[in-house]
Image: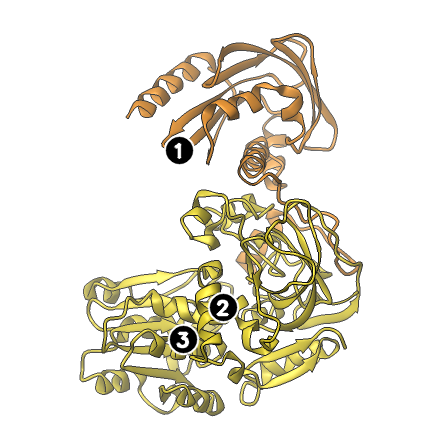
Chain colours: A yellow, B orange
Amino acid sequence: MKALCWYGKTDVRYQDVPDPQILNPHDAIIRVTLTAICGSDLHLYDGAIPTMEKGDILGHEFMGEIVEIGTAVTQLKVGDKVVVPFHISCNHCQHCVDKNFAACDNTNPNAVMADKLYGSSGAAMFGYSHLFGGYAGGQAQYVRVPFADGGALRIPAHIPDEKVLFLSDIFPTGYMAVENCGLKPGDQIAIWGAGPVGQFAIRSAFLLGASKVYSIDDVPERLKLAELGGAEAIDFSKCDLLDELAYRTGGRGPDACIDCVGMEAHGYGMQGLYDRLKTATFLETDRPIALREAILSCRKGGTVSIPGVYGGILDKIPWGSAFSKGLTFKMGQTHVHRYLKPLLDRIIDNQIDPSVIISHRLKLSEAPMAYDLFKKHQQECTKVVLDPLH
Amino acid sequence: MESQTEEQRAQSKVAKDLHEGHKIQKAVTIRAKPEGLYQFWRNLSQLKSILSNVNDIVLINGKRSRWEVQGPFGTPVTWTAEIIEDKPGHMISWKTLPGSDVNHSGSIWFLPRGEQTEIKLQLLYNPPGGKLGDWVATLRQRDPGTLILENLRRFKALIETGEVPTVENQPHGEKKLKYDILSVWQHEIHH
């Protein structure tokens, strides 16, 4: 089959690889019908995530048709159209039983490696380094899906792929980020980053009762898309952001702040310079600019929710502010399995059309160019979906 | 509270039994009753199937068994173990007999915790290759503590899900390079 393989920083290649096989009883093999590049794939593309191996197949947002099932798969059958969550969860350990699927104990064969870096390992992920399991990803024509029952969600055949593909990651991620804020009716939310996760957080915030959503970015096209979703756009390159947010919220600050940016934030001024210097001289791994702003601007007693990915060590976090204001922090990988069915229902009910964020429809063979485009030209490129059959 | 007392009792017992060498202690919690887990562990030929670094376990009699294990430098290491205490459904203690490559003694407990079981394993051993060998093994992630934890996790996955997670024999591009924990840290430091 054809697949997109990682070979190093900004080096990804479309090439022939062996077809996947069933390796365990709960596996299924899926013929991929649509896949996408995630913002977090850019962390791999930038070489910011350790333990990638040359030749690893990328991709954790994908859907397709089941072509083969293992002996223990009972709820799905060959021919089913399914969307697959980006993380792999066993459905049997205590964390899965408690519906904290991203904390699954049993799917990462390299869990001891994650122990050493993070204290303990969460669920494995598709196509996201050996630290997180080393599973081959879905930017490919076929992919092996472990624990298919309870993971892969069956989709009615008449629903277009583009409307449901983002159930695999970014729609649930934006939704859970808002759910984590524990909104009360009338609450106002500020959301850093108007990329795909930010766009879904904006739309989810209104679905969950926010009265006002501020979308913070410096890319005009993304801010326009945020406005289409009902948000008030704030271009942080053109204002004093903390002053602007305080003013717009009557001096209180947003009731909740969501950091949809994560470890590779772009900042201006002294703070941006500081992080660039420190990461360039290896004294810091992540650039937590959005997170600092979220903490400083959030209202007293408010919640800071962090769906943006952080991988390592952060510097100069205003902990005194967080303590003084009594903030609540919620963060972590999304428990996608929790949200699949309820969010599919919202899509079927026409409450949201996730396909509005797609800016580019390309072939898998064009993926190397698409990664470059997604990294360098955020003005025009919000979200790339890839057709693996051509 | 009962299980806590149980554990304290167990810990003082192991302190008495194991009085020299390197100490390793590892634990996992499994969604299953202690009795079945004990039985799986007590059936050494069944146990062999899930221990990733064990080449062979030969039963000599009800209490004695001969083990061949992949050592840290790829060479096999052998020992003969004798069960010195066996409390069905609860704990097993063993020690190696003279003539073994790696002398050690160990205990494993199966402690009920609500609907789950805490498995606690303690081991005292003298590392092959001395302290230097031990240090190198740690860097290469093949130290006994890591191997034991990996195997306890494989056991947990098998019991809870019916399979052990794997990515062996899945497709990938060419030039597959091996990483190790050393390069992970180097990356963390230099990135």
Residue B162 point in image, percent of width and height: 59, 38
Residue placed under numbered mark 3 in the picture:
A201
Residue A261: which numbered mark, if any? Answer: none
Q: Position of residue B146 (x, y in %)?
A: 56, 36
**Amino acid residing under circle 1:** Glu
Instruction: Name the chain under label 1.
Output: B
CA separation, marks 1 and 3? 38 Å
In this rendering, which labeled residue sits more in front, label 2 or label 1?
1
Residue bearing the label numbered 1: B115
User: Tag 3, which secondary structure?
Assistant: helix
Circle 3 packing at 10 Å, graded few (<14), some (14-19), many (20+), is many
Q: Amino acid at mark 3?
A: Ala
Q: Residue at x 32, y 78 (%)?
A: A190
**Which residue corresponds to the image point at 49% horizontal and 26% vertical from the top-left?**
B121
Residue A368, above or below A316:
below
Sequence-wise first label, 3 or 2: 3
Query: Which picture quadrant has residue A1?
Result: bottom right
Q: CA distance from mark 3 to mark 2?
A: 28 Å
Tag 3 and tag 2, C-beta contact below 8 Å: no
Q: Quadrant of the C terminus of chain B?
A: bottom right
Q: Is residue B31 above or below residue A152?
A: above
- Are discs 3 and 2 both within one chain? yes
